Amino acid sequence: MSKWSSRIPGFYRLPVAKRRELLREHAGHDLIDDAALAALEGGGIDVETADGMIENVVGTYSLPLGIALNFLVNGRDYLVPMVIEEPSVVAAASNAARMVRQGGGFFAEADSPIMVGQVQLLSVADPDGAASRILCAKEELLALAGAATARLCERGGGPKDIVTRVVSNPGDPDGGMLVVHLEIDCRDAMGANLVNTVAEAVADRLADLAGPGTSVGLRILSNLADRRLVRVRARVPKAALVGTSGEDGARVRDGVVAASRFAELDPYRAATHNKGIMNGIDAVLLATGNDWRSVEAGAHAHAARSGRYAPIATWRAEEDDLVGVLEMPLAVGTVGGAQRVHSGARLSLALLGADSAQELACVVGAAGLSSNLAALRALATEGIQRGHMSLHARSVARAVGARGELLDRVAAEIAALGDVKPERAREILERVRNLGPACQPVFLEVSK
Ligand code: MEV
């Protein structure tokens, strides 16, 4: 178990400066220094750096960076950085992580970081014969691929296997298409560049082996990273499902199971169910400078692998508890890419403290399962709008100048009135200010 905890009660009520102070204490290491935190003021990159990252730059564009709390994954506490524009995702993930914590936390495992590079061979006269010649030359091909990734091989990664797939026959309009998969262990990198380099390095030799007339088509990684899956499991005791409004735990559990079944039976619902999972996943990917589009592509391809689009996380009742499992491809890295130049991404990684890409994948998967639980729990009980409204009420109260206890009070009142508008918030703020210190604060339970 960790020596420190990711539980920081009342964190959401504190001013930003105080939250930053607490982060430094709770991170449990000295990587979060003043300079690292100051880098966040500009959103993590300056215009000059941005100009070196993409083309035709005219500026930078910031999003909020929040910290999801309460995460216990494989017995270790994590502060989980999330970058997202949507209110309530951070609070909801934190709340659900607190419930899962009561059942011992998330248990997660990530496969070895193996990515697949595809080489498309066209006009192959005899695809089956070509495939067996290629497989016979596996050692030579792996050596050729290894030479293109010498430094990766030194770190224990590199090409591990070659697989052939006949995807069309000589009679087909494509004229015999053979696809060769190069399986490459990318260690702590996401691996797109490494894999593409290897695919380009071996393609001509593959075409030679495939026989006369063969031409090389595409040479590119596959985002269906199904050799790099993460599996996360969470057990929530019935009692932990009882909310502030005192709902019956067993009814909440059964409601979540029924919501899961809905997604399992109906692709229309599965798409929304998975979107809720990706709320948590993408937010951590963005915060840590990872390629969220590639993970999105992989997640949805995995969701459709049976030929029918399905949920990537499901829930069942086990004895008295609610048990959820998530499985999806998660190609993430802790080195390279945007992390090299983006100080916000570096800070997020330091804060998270994952020692490897596999460990990061476990935490990202837990963030996804947590977001899913929060959404299903809300949908199966009071509906999604009440929580959204409470959070929206806080931002409206803040916008009219309410702070500290006044913020809690004004937000609670406009939410209770169902009139979440600046005019009403201003009116209430005036009134409670005039009432003076005798006015008792009413606290909104957003994220504890
Ligand atoms: C909204 O961003 C996500 C949800 O629609 C997910 C779900 O319905 O499960 C609430």
Image (spheres, rainbow, N blue to C red):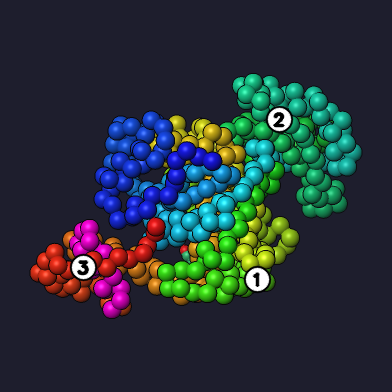
Query: Judging from the image, what secondary structure is the residue with disc 1 in?
Result: helix
Residue 358 included in the magenta stretch of the image: no
* Between marks 3 and 2 in the image, the one whose residue lies nearer the viewer: 3
Q: Is mark 2 on a helix, strand or loop?
A: strand
Badge 2 amino acid: Pro
Disc assigned to residue 159:
2
The disc at residue 440 is 3
First along the sequence among labels 3 and 2: 2
Span of residues in magenta: 402-417
User: Measured from the top left, where is residue 175 in percent x and y?
Assistant: 81, 47
The residue nearer to you, when weighing 185 against 355, is 355
Circle 1: residue type = Arg
Q: Is residue 43 visible?
A: no
Queried on whether the Cβ of the residue with tag 3 lies below 8 angstroms from ligand 1, the answer reads no
Determine the image quadrant of residue 158: top right
Q: Mark 3 is on which residue type? A: Gln
Task: Out of 277 and 133, give the one closest to the viewer.
Answer: 277
Q: Residue furthest bottom?
A: 417
Q: Residue at x 62, y 24 (%)?
A: 155
Q: Could you tell me which quadrant the N terminus lies in? A: top right
Check disc 3 and report its element: helix, strand or loop: loop
Total labels: the figure holds: 3
For marks 3 and 2, give the CA distance.
65 Å
Disc 2 versus disc 1: nearer the observer: 1
Q: Name the residue under label 1.
A: 261
Q: Nearer the viewer, residue 175 or 134?
A: 134
Q: Is the magenta stretch mostly helix, strand or loop?
A: helix
| Residue 379 as seen in the image, left or right of residue 396 | right
